[in-house]
Amino acid sequence: MKAIVDDYFSKFLKKDISSFKDKVNLVFSRKRDKNEELLLSREDLIKIFRIDDKIIISTINKHYDFFSNMIKKSSVDDIFTTIFFERVANYLNFKDDIEIINIYFCDKKKDTVSKRDEIRKLTISDIDIYIKFRNEVNPTQKVDKDFLIESITRDINNGFTYGLFIDNNLVGATSMQMLPYMQERVEEIGISILPQFRNRGYGTLLLLNTTNAILDRGKIPICRASSDNIASNKMIVKSGYTLYANMLIF
């Protein structure tokens, strides 16, 4: 199953991951999919990827020389450091916080910790409740309602989305990303819980149920978490996931 994850992120990086033989690798492709980049609201993305004992840097033409000079005689340990990231950020005039993302995948079902009546699969009749819940979780984030309805409808029809109900109110739910490729083989899981209900073990139960549902359909579930979010990383590992790679995007 790891081969499927390799294939998925090969498409993300625009080159077959298994083809990399060096410890440090620089990728330049004229075929970078603009549609994919625009999903993240930036065209000139730099992707720094650490998998096993290798570093992969995916860039575009105008930044190629900069990175080519940066990685000369550099080891894996030299590159995946705060000093290296800060040099890249200064060169790109990148003002956002530098955030390392841990990527996990799961290939084996794990029994849920317990059975709780308040956790169940969402149905089509829950869509309005779900829209209200998403607005409560991210009150400042503007989300296209039609896109959200399309996305949650797909997830519900596939049987992947679970909700946490307390006193008949939806306070937590899982969702899947709509992917630009390999949706038939991979699902990326997101978990949202209202702040006042966090750190109670609900996230683990939601993730376990969703993960098992995806595996039952013959797909590979993937999760991402900021390396700074210790609780989320612990939850993912506790749910049976294996660390696949670390990633930084500028």
Image (spheres, rainbow, N blue to C red):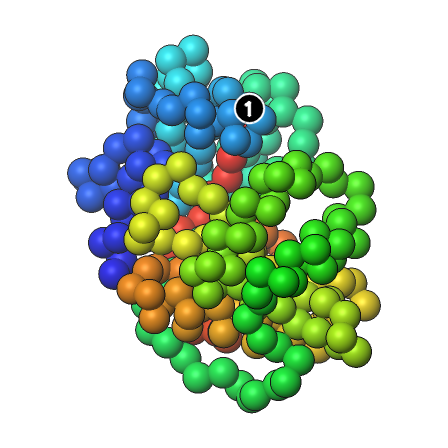
Q: From this viewpoint, is residue 76 visible? A: no
- Residue at screen point 50% across, 20% down: 43
Give the image location of residue 16, x and y in percent: 23, 37
Q: Does residue 8 lie above or below 227 as drawn?
A: above
Local SS, label 1: loop
Q: Quadrant of residue 79?
A: top left
Horizontal side of residue 102 vs 148, given as left or right: left
Q: 187 or 52, which is in the foreground?
A: 187
Horizontal side of residue 188 vs 182, given as left or right: right
Give the image location of residue 144, x and y in percent: 66, 36
Q: 156 or 38, which is in the foreground?
A: 156
Q: Does residue 153 lie above or below 209 as drawn?
A: above
Residue found at the far bottom of this picture:
114
Horizontal side of residue 224 vs 166, given as left or right: left
Residue found at the far front of this picture:
125
Quadrant of the snapshot with the N terminus: bottom left
Look at mark 1 in the image and give the residue it sits on. 42
Q: Quadrant of residue 18?
A: top left
- Which amino acid is tagged 1? Arg
Give the image location of residue 15, x and y in percent: 26, 33
Number of numbered callouts drawn = 1
- Residue at screen point 68% across, 27% down: 95
Residue found at the far top of this picture:
62
